[in-house]
């Protein structure tokens, strides 16, 4: 997971059951690159004959599982000639297995591929994905998904340029990383909801003094701390500077006083006991599950936990954007993991029809009903509960204020591993803030200089 379920919409203003298979990917690689489909696009699934689509996803948690299960059921009922052979995995398992599968002879037809350089960018470079531009024209995706959304699943054909070129994926959900708050515990501690970054940090000290665990974080998986650091960074570094780093663009720098302050803040939180002592030994899922059961007061995480936390905590939980240090909100966020099509698929039209079905206006209503955050037609949807309304409102504010900045691990093909390991070292105090930033700068600058 990133489960994030983990994307981006940053720079430009924004967004306006099935058989379970355990099949393994083919082990024989095929060095030839398949070309994009040519000729007229067929958009009527009922006329595509008997087809089996192998579908790989990471929709395994709460509302994610509920929405895709319902949409798959509806698709099969409407188009019984198309059988969906679904394989569902955790994000980490999917990321690992997908790389092998796409280089083999039996890849899935349609799947979720993280839109960052380590996944989608490398797949585009290897010619393993179908460009979706023809389908976007045929289905009107460009009318429902503005350029500010499409750019985060767009690459040049050589995979070097992120944000322009052809469309290679389509997401279902929006994302923003904010702060889940146990309102009951906050009230019991006599702390008001923080409105500024200084007030938030002051509340951490107050909660610690009252015997509470102020901030829940399980970083055994390494990536969760990226979201926490990104949240702190966004209160210290200008959004455009973060965007250069996150998108791997020329002209950025990690080794700045502002980034140093952000890294030092994390170290200070460790020293002051705001995080659990086993922060690097606790898994992501056990951490948020502990929060749901009443451990800790704040949880910095994404909107993908909305369904699970809302179900378990009811009215005791809310979701807010990180309190601003500058008066203007800033938060990590973007789109959910988009759906893509293998260039080796024998049924690209059917795969595109499936993607169209699960991203349609009707599908957005299903997403909202199952505690997800629809990426399109968001304003037309009704949140199912109080937490959902809070999430919709936070995302709407972030979009309106152009406050979203990218996930930092998208910057280079290796940044996910680099920053994940470096943050573990920082939290364990095996590296100083300067050593932490030097590690990131080496990865970033090496990539930028070679990606010309």
Image (cartoon, rainbow, N blue to C red):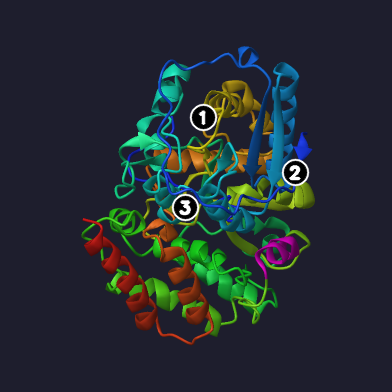
Q: Main secondary structure of the magenta part?
A: helix
Mark 2 falls on what kind of element? Answer: loop
Image quarter in which the C terminus is found: bottom left
Of the two numbered discs 1 and 2 in the rendering, the one whose residue sits closer to the viewer: 2
Q: Which residue is mark 2?
A: 21
Q: Is residue 49 above or below residue 311?
A: above
> Which residue is rendered at x = 77% and y = 34% of the image?
18
Magenta-colored span: 283-291
Mark 1 falls on what kind of element? Answer: loop
Q: Are marks 1 and 2 in contact (CB under 8 Å)?
A: no
How packed mark 3 is, by other alpha carbons closer than 10 Å (few <14, some 14-19, many 20 or more), is some
> Can residue 63 be seen in this snapshot?
no
Q: Position of residue 422 (x, y in %)?
A: 46, 76
How packed mark 2 is, by other alpha carbons closer than 10 Å (few <14, some 14-19, many 20 or more), is some
Of the two numbered discs 1 and 3 in the rendering, the one whose residue sits closer to the viewer: 3
In this view, which residue lies farthest toward the bottom?
A: 430
Q: Which residue is mark 1?
A: 376
Label 1 or label 3, whichever comes before in sequence order: 3
Q: Is residue 262 left or right of residue 205?
A: left
Magenta stretch: includes residue 290: yes
Of the two numbered discs 2 and 3 in the rendering, the one whose residue sits closer to the viewer: 2
What whole-number distance in Å separates the C-alpha atoms at marks 2 and 3?
23 Å
Q: Is residue 229 above or below residue 77?
A: below
Mark linked to residue 119: 3
Q: Is residue 252 left or right of residue 292?
A: left
- Comparing 41 with 272, the one in front is 41
Q: Position of residue 440 (x, y in %)?
A: 36, 72
Label 2 or label 3, whichever comes before in sequence order: 2
């Amino acid at each position: 997971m990133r489960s994030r379920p983990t994307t981006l919409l940053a720079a430009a203003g924004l967004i306006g059951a099935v058989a379970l298979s355990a099949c393994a990917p083919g082990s024989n690689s095929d060095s030839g690159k398949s070309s994009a489909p040519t000729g007229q696009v067929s958009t009527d699934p009922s006329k595509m004959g008997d087809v089996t689509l192998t579908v790989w996803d990471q929709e395994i948690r709460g509302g994610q599982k509920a929405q895709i299960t319902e949409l798959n059921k509806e698709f099969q009922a409407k188009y019984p000639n198309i059988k969906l052979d679904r394989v569902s995995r955790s994000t980490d398992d999917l990321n690992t297995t997908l790389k092998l599968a796409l280089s083999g002879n039996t890849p899935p037809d349609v799947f979720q591929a993280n839109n960052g350089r380590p996944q989608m960018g490398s797949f585009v470079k290897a010619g393993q994905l179908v460009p979706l531009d023809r389908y976007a024209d045929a289905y009107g995706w460009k009318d429902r998904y503005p350029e500010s959304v499409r750019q985060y699943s767009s690459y040049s054909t050589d995979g070097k340029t992120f944000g322009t070129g052809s469309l290679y994926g389509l997401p279902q959900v929006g994302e923003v990383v904010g702060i889940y708050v146990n309102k009951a515990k906050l009230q019991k501690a006599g702390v008001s909801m923080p409105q500024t970054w200084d007030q938030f940090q002051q509340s951490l000290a107050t909660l610690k003094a009252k015997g509470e665990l102020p901030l829940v974080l399980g970083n055994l998986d390494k990536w969760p701390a990226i979201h926490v650091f990104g949240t702190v960074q966004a209160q210290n570094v200008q959004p455009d500077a973060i965007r250069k780093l996150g998108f791997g663009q020329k002209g950025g720098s990690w080794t700045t006083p502002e980034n140093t302050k952000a890294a030092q803040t994390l170290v200070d939180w460790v020293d002051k006991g705001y995080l659990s002592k086993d922060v690097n030994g606790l898994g992501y899922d056990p951490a948020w599950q502990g929060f749901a059961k009443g451990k800790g007061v704040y949880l910095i995480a994404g909107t993908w936990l909305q369904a699970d936390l809302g179900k378990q905590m009811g009215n005791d939980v809310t979701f807010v954007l990180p309190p601003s240090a500058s008066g203007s909100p800033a938060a990590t966020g973007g789109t959910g993991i988009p759906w893509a099509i293998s260039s080796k698929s024998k049924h690209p039209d059917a795969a595109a029809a499936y993607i169209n079905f699960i991203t349609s206006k009707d599908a957005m209503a299903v997403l909202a009903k199952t505690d997800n955050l629809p990426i399109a037609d968001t304003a037309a949807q009704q949140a199912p509960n109080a937490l959902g309304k809070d999430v919709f409102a936070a995302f709407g504010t972030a979009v309106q204020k152009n406050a979203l900045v990218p996930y930092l691990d998208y910057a280079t093909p290796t940044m996910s591993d680099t920053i994940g390991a470096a943050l573990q070292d920082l939290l364990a105090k095996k590296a100083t803030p300067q050593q932490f930033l030097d590690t990131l700068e080496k990865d970033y600058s090496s990539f930028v200089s070679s990606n010309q």
